[in-house]
């Protein structure tokens, strides 16, 4: 199976990675490095309205099936002969998730695996390892998704701890940020809820010791970096290893909070289809800084799809347990 594809079906977006497994190199962290044949991302909002109804809407199902069909077709055009497709928070929570899984099987010929939050965390950590040049200390990797946030602590030899919490950018945006632009009280209520939700992570950290390095992955993190850099078009090579400090995150929170949705869509580095959830995402990052007592994070453009690819199609390095 020389060319394979991994697809991450998230609550807010869908991501594709296609790679050639015939000639993987080894990085200095011990993981295998595969050159991408194709990478892509689309904002698909599978979890839109899920918090209120407990169900995937028909519109969201149709939208995501169409995008999944496009990704599968593009991957096959690149020569992909095997696929792994993982569904995360929205599919874990929705009462009608089976409807989506069955429709994907019938329409795209693809089996969607709904993975637990703890497994999502492990695979995200593995994805980050594939892009690191050196790793000489314990790190915390966190991934803010549309419906959940994963935290993984470890190094190249083992994972010291991992957890997933039901806190992503979609629900807080819909539940708390009702005005456009949001009011101060709405923003304060959102941040208080985020801080409360992160308490579980504090318990994990108390068992594993202090974190010296923080690495962020996912759309929220890369967007914060892109806005910091004023990027007019997204460039993953410029994003890689960018340092985002606590003061910059607070600056962006203040910026987004005083602008309407339409005004946020005009900001360089902020994709128009992410402008409705970036404020909630930035608030989660700010509260993670507060929880860990850290002043900055490093950005990785890698994540679940890369870890999924390596775990399924290459040696299962980085599982740790």
Image: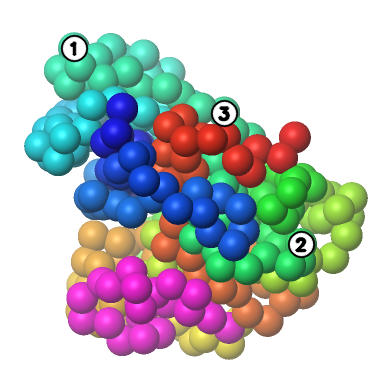
Which residue is depicted at the point 57% across and 28% down?
116
Counting residues from the N terminus, which is met first, the one under dot 3 or under dot 1?
Answer: 1
Secondary structure under tag 3 reads: loop
User: Horizontal and vertical percent for residue 187?
Assistant: 52, 69
Residue under label 3:
116
Tell me how far mark 1 sits from mark 2, CA to CA: 44 Å
Q: Residues within 10 Å of mark 3 (few under 14, many from 20)?
A: some
Q: Quadrant of the N terminus?
A: top left
Q: Quadrant of the C terminus?
A: top right
Tell me how far mark 3 sits from mark 2, CA to CA: 24 Å
The stretch of residues the image draws in magenta is 224-245
The image quadrant of residue 235 is: bottom left
Q: Residues within 10 Å of mark 2 (few under 14, many from 20)?
A: many
Counting residues from the N terminus, which is met first, the one under dot 1 or under dot 2?
Answer: 1
Residue under label 1:
106
Residue under label 2:
138
> In the image, is 73 to the left or to the right of 258?
left
> In the image, is 131 to the left or to the right of 35?
right
User: Horizontal and vertical percent for residue 115?
Assistant: 51, 27
Which residue is depicted at the point 43% across and 72% down?
240
Counting residues from the N terminus, which is met first, the one under dot 3 or under dot 2?
Answer: 3
The image quadrant of residue 315 is: top right
């Amino acid at each position: 199976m020389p060319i394979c594809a991994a697809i991450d079906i998230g609550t807010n977006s869908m991501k594709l990675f296609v790679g050639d497994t015939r000639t993987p190199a080894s990085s200095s962290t011990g993981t295998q490095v595969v050159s991408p044949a194709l990478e892509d991302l689309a904002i698909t909002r599978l979890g839109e309205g899920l918090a209120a109804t407990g169900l995937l809407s028909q519109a969201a199902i149709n939208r995501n099936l169409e995008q999944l069909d496009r990704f599968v077709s593009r991957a096959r055009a690149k020569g992909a002969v095997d696929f792994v497709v993982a569904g995360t928070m929205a599919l874990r929570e929705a009462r009608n998730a089976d409807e989506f899984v069955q429709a994907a099987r019938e329409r795209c010929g693809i089996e969607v695996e709904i993975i637990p939050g703890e497994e999502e965390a492990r695979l995200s950590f593995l994805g980050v390892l594939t892009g690191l040049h050196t790793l000489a200390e314990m790190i915390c990797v966190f991934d803010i998704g549309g419906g959940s946030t994963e935290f993984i602590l470890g190094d190249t030899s083992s994972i010291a701890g991992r957890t997933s919490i039901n806190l992503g950018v979609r629900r807080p945006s819909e539940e708390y940020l009702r005005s456009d632009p949001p009011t101060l009280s709405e923003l304060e209520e959102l941040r208080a809820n985020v801080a409360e939700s992160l308490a579980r992570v504090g318990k994990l950290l108390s068992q594993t010791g202090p974190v010296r390095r923080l690495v962020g992955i996912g759309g929220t993190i890369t967007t914060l970096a892109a806005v910091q850099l004023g990027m007019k078009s997204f460039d993953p090579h410029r994003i890689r290893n960018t340092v985002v400090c606590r003061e910059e995150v607070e600056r962006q929170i203040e910026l987004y909070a005083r602008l309407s949705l339409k005004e946020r869509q005009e900001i360089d580095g902020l994709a128009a289809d992410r402008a409705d959830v970036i404020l909630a995402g930035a608030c989660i990052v700010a509260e993670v800084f507060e929880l860990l007592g850290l002043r900055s994070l490093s950005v990785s453009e890698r994540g679940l799809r890369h870890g999924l690819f390596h775990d399924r199609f290459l040696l299962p390095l980085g599982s740790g347990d």
